Image (tube, rainbow, N blue to C red):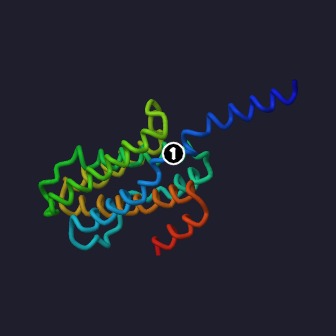
Amino acid sequence: MHNWICVLFFFFFCSAATPALGCDWLRHYGHLSNDSLVLVEQMGGQLTKQECPVSFPNNMYQRIKKAEVESRLVFIRDSLELIAGLYRHGNLSSVTWDTGKTEHFLISIHRQIDGLNSCVPTNRKPDSRLRRYYRKLARNTLSEMGGSAASWELIRKETRMHLLRLDLLVASIRGPAAASRGRSALH
C-alpha cells in the first residue's frame, strides 16, 4: 500500500510540474527575445545615459530567481505584458523612432507573451509589486516628463535592462550552462 501511495504522489508531482518544466515553447524564447533586444536598440538612436527616476527592481529579480519554475515563467510573461502596456498606452508622437522597428518590437514581445501563455495559467494576475513598479515607472517618466522624447528614451533604456534580466531568468530555467552564457551578455 505504501508503494502505491509513493507512486501516486510521484505521478501527481510530475504531472503538476510538467507544464512549466516541459514547456516546449521555451526553445523559441531565445530567438524572439534576441529579436526584441536588437529591435529595442535599433528603433531609436544611442541609448540615453540619463538615470531613470525609478530604481531598477533588482530585489524583485533576485527574489523571483529563487522561486519555482512556474512562478518565474509567470513573472516573465507578466513583465512582458507590462512592458508592452507602457508602449501601448503612451503617445509615441514625440519620438523619432523607426516606426517599423517599433512595431516589430511590439509584435515580438506579444509573440513571447502568447508563447508563455501556453506554458502557464493565464488567469493569474501579475504580482502587485510588479504592477506597482511599472505604474511608478510610467508615472515618473512618461507622465511627469510630459511624454517627451527624453522620457521615452528612458523607457526604452529600462526596457532593454528588463529584457536582459528576463533572459537570465529563462536561462536559469533552461540550465546552469545557459545561465552563465546569459550573464556574460550583461557585461
Number of numbered tags placed on the structure image: 1
The residue located at (30%, 58%) in the rendering is 155
Where residue 163 appears, as percent x and y from the top left, is: 40, 59
- Residue at (25, 63) in percent of width and height: 153
Residue 11, position as x, y percentages in the image: 70, 33
State the residue position of label 1: 23
Up/down of 36 relative to 113, above or below:
below
Residue 26 vs 157, above or below: the answer is: above
Q: Which residue is at the far bottom?
A: 187
Task: Report the residue that reaches farthest toward the top.
Answer: 1
- Quarter of the figure with residue 154: bottom left
For the N terminus, give its image quadrant.
Answer: top right
Residue 179, placed above or below residue 140: below
Residue 165 or residue 9, whichever sits in front: 9
- Label 1: state its secondary structure: loop
Q: Which x, y percent locates residue 92?
A: 16, 53
Nearest the camera: 14 or 134? Answer: 14
**Residue 35 found in image quarter:** bottom left
Q: Position of residue 118 (x, y in %)?
A: 44, 39
Between 149 and 72, the one nearer to me in the picture: 72
Residue, far right: 2
* Residue positioned 62% across, 34% down in the render: 16
**What kind of residue is marked 1?**
Cys
Residue 97 left/right relative to 53: left
Q: Residues within 10 Å of mark 1 (few under 14, many from 20)?
A: some
